[in-house]
Image: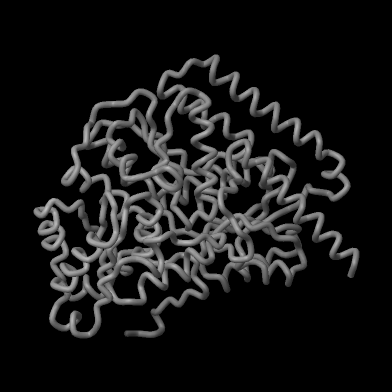
Amino acid sequence: MNINNTSIIEAPRNSCAFSGALQTIENIERAVSIVHSTAGCAAQQYLGVNKVSGNRGAGCTGGIQVPSSNVIEKQVIFGGTSRLREQIKNTIKVIDADLYVILSGCATELVGDDIPAMTKEAQEQRYPVINAQTPGFKGDIHHGYEIAVTTLIQQLPKIYKVSSEKIKGLVNIFGIIPNQDVFWQGNLFELKRILESIGLSANTLFGFGQSVENWKQVSNAELNLVFSPWGIKAAEYLKDKYNIPYLNFNSLPAGFNTASFIREVARQLNINEGVVEKFIETEENKLNYHLKNMTDFYYEYNLQKEFAIVSESSLALGTSEFLSDLGLIPKVVIITDNPEDNYREYLQTELEKLLSLGEANLYFEEDQEKINKIIKKNENELELILGSSMENQIADIINVPIQHISFPIWDDVILEKTYIGYRGAVTLIEDLSTAIRNFNRTIEVI
C-alpha cells in the first residue's frame, strides 16, 4: 500500500454498512437480527451509534444483546456455516419473533460462508428467516440502511404471502435512517400526523407500533415518499415491481415550507383541496401565533444570527430555508453524508435559491478536523452553529452558541423530539432561543 495515497478521516460520524443494517432491523418490532460475524461488530454499533444518538437504547434484541455467531479464528479458517446453522436454531428457540434477519460481517463475507444456503435451509423448515449481505466494506451506514430496506422488500414475499392490491390512501416513508437521524422517531411521528390530517395513512415502517406486519403492506401503498438520497433504491424497486409511483423530496420539510410538501402529495393522490388548505391554514396560523409571542425575545436577544449548519443532506436544506424565513442568515452549510454528484448539484442549486444566502458556502465533508477548519476559517461571519456534539469544541473556540440538530449527539437525551414539520419548527425555535439566551447570560456572568 502506498501510504501517500491513503485517506485518513478524523472522528468520522458515518459508521459502516453493517451498523446501518443492524440499527435498521433493530427498530422494527418483532424483527430480530442474527449477526454472522466476529464478537465486536454488534458492540461497536451499539457504542458508536446508539449511545451517541440521543442516548437511545438498543432494545432487548439489539446492540450488545443481539444474537451473534461470534465467529473466531477456527471459523475464519475452516468456514463458519455450521456455526451459523447452530445460531439460527438457538435464536429461534429462545426469541419469539415474526422475522429473523441474518446480517453478515466483513470476516464471514471475506471467507465466503454460504449464508444464502443456511437461509434456504431454515426456510425449508418453515422458519421466517432472510439474509442481507452487510459487510462493512460494502459502504457506509447509509448504504447499510439501503441494503436492509431493499432486502426486506425483496425477500419477505419468500416467507410470507404479500399482496400487491392497493390500499387507498396508504403511503410508505423512506429515507429516514433510525439512529443516524437522531430525531428519526419524532420525525416519523410528525410526518404521520401531517399525512393523517389530510386523510392519508402513513406506513412509517420503524419505531413504536411498526412491526413486520407494516412491511408486509409496503407493496399495497398508493405512493412512496422519499426524504433523502438513501431511499431512492427502495422506491425504484417498488415502482418497477409493483408499479408504485414515488415522490422524491430530497430533504425533510420544516416550518412554512411544509406546505409545499403537503400540496405535492395531495396533488399526486387527488386529495380534496379544501381539506388540504384548511389544514395548512390552521397549522400556519398556529406557527405564526407562536412567532408573534416571541417577538420581544427575538429583538432583545438579537436572534437574527449568521449561522453555520453541519448536518446530513436530508436536514440541511429544509432547516436552512425555515431559519431564513425567520431572518437568520446561513453562511456555511456542511453536508456530512456522501450523496452522489447529481444530488450535490441539486443541493447547490436549491441553496442558491435562498435569497438570504448571500455569500454562503456549501461543503461536503465528514472529517472533523476539516469541518473545524472550515468553521474557523469563517469565524468572523458566524454567530451561531447548528450541528452535532462534535462541534461543541469549535463553538467554544470561536465563542458562539451551538444548537444540536444532527448525529452524533451524546449530551442530550432524545426520544421523540423533532425539528421538522410544523410542530418541529416550534420546538426548534424554543431550543434555539434557549441556547442563545443561555449563551448570552453566560457571557454576562463572565
Return the residue found at the far front: 94
* Residue 230 vertical placement versus 76 (above, below): above
Give the residue drawn at x 13%, y 72%: 82
Q: Position of residue 165 (x, y in %)?
A: 24, 27
Residue 133 in sight here: no
Q: Nearer the viewer, residue 279 or 43?
A: 43
Instruction: Find residue 433 and report its horizontal and vertical position in percent.
Output: 76, 50
Q: Is residue 293 visible?
A: yes
Please name whichever residue, 78 or 8, is drawn nearer the observer in this view of the structure: 78
- The quarter holding residue 209 reads top left
How many marks are shown on the rendered structure? 0
Give the image location of residue 39, x and y in percent. Answer: 32, 76
Q: How is the image coloured?
A: one colour
Asked whether 171 or 87 is in front, the reply is 87
Residue at left 45%, top 22%?
Answer: 267
Vertical side of 338 occupied by 367: above or below: below
